[in-house]
Image: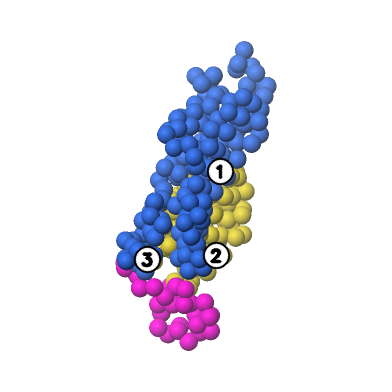
Chain colours: A blue, B yellow
Amino acid sequence: MFFFVRHIQSVTLLTLFLIGIADFNNLQNLGFMIFFVIYTAYEEVYRRTSKLLILFIGFFILGNYYISLNYPVLLEAGADTAMFKWFSWLNLVTNDDINDPFGMCQPQDGKMCVDTDMYFRLKPVYLNWFILISMSLLMDVNKMYAYKQEVAQLTE
Amino acid sequence: MVSQKESNFPVVLLWSSRVSVFFMSYMYHTDISFINLVWIIFTFLFSVKVTFFASILVMLPVLSWEFFLIYAVRVPSLQDLWIIQEYGSNFEWTMKKPVFEQAAIFMTVAQFFMMIGTI
């Protein structure tokens, strides 16, 4: 049990890596692959930098919200397919439709349609929130290993 | 008797605040909700004590300001105040369920005030 908890970050990151293996060409899945490789290889690096995982997943949550607020403005300013693909690669949009990238409403006549009712307009990406809470739990577990003498005694 | 500082109360308060702010952030899709969302991510990065201290300094005034304006904008006798005319326009949406929404905001602000007693 102690051994399992000590390496729980590898198990979690491997799970995320395997979930995203079907679609590798995006920042989120690439990031989890890199984190998995580095943190499995260098445990000490993980012990010191586990906050990076929270920042990493926080980027997608905040980015998604920020872009959803400003996407109509970006479109008016001349956002094009290339920019949409860039956002899509960054995992900041949730829909494949350039005119409705957040599923907020149905596009009309091929133009961007913005739902004027702001109530629950943007649906949270629950998977990201679940991963965020998981990463937070990982960090709490990580804190238990800050006391090296006790850990060494338990390992013997 | 276990004091609030020694009990699990701060952790429970932190999680209830996170849930309330999360709910508010997605209920109102606005720029201020984005600030609320940043706060949630912030809370996962630091200890409970640091989070509460920073929340009291930053988020408590922000949420109080938000609560005041959302409430005051809908009070007819306050419409002539310069503060409402200057800043109230961003909060003038028609509420779908006024009682429920005001209660949700009030509970969120109250939770942030409760943080003062825990640090």
Q: Gap between marks 1 and 2, in whole Å?
A: 26 Å
Answer few, some or many: residues within 10 Å of disc 3's Cα (few below 14, many 20 plus, some between 14 and 19). few
Q: Gap between marks 2 and 3, in whole Å?
A: 36 Å
Secondary structure of residue under mark 2: helix
Residue B69: image x %, image y %? 48, 73
Q: Gap between marks 1 and 3, in whole Å?
A: 33 Å
At 62% from the left and 48% from the top, the residue drawn is: B50
Secondary structure of residue under mark 3: loop
Task: List the residue tagged with mark 3.
Answer: A111
Q: Nearer the viewer, mark 1 or mark 3?
A: 3
Q: Are marks 2 and 3 in contact (CB under 8 Å)?
A: no
Which numbered marker is on residue A56?
1
Residue occupying the far top of the picture: A156
Residue B18 is one of the magenta-drawn residues: no
At 47% from the left and 65% from the top, the residue drawn is: A75
Q: Are marks 1 and 3 in contact (CB under 8 Å)?
A: no
Q: Do callouts 2 and 3 point to residues on the same chain? A: no
Q: Look at label 2 and name its amino acid.
A: Val
Task: List the residue tagged with mark 2.
Answer: B62
Q: Look at label 3 and name its amino acid.
A: Lys
* Chain label for disc 2: B
Q: Which residues are magenta?
A: B71-99
In this view, A80 is above or below A92: below
Secondary structure of residue under mark 1: helix
Q: Nearer the viewer, mark 1 or mark 2?
A: 1
* Chain label for disc 1: A
Which numbered marker is on residue A42?
none
Residue B74: image x %, image y %? 40, 77
Q: Look at label 1 and name its amino acid.
A: Phe
At 39% from the left and 65% from the top, the residue drawn is: A112
Q: Are marks 1 and 2 in contact (CB under 8 Å)?
A: no
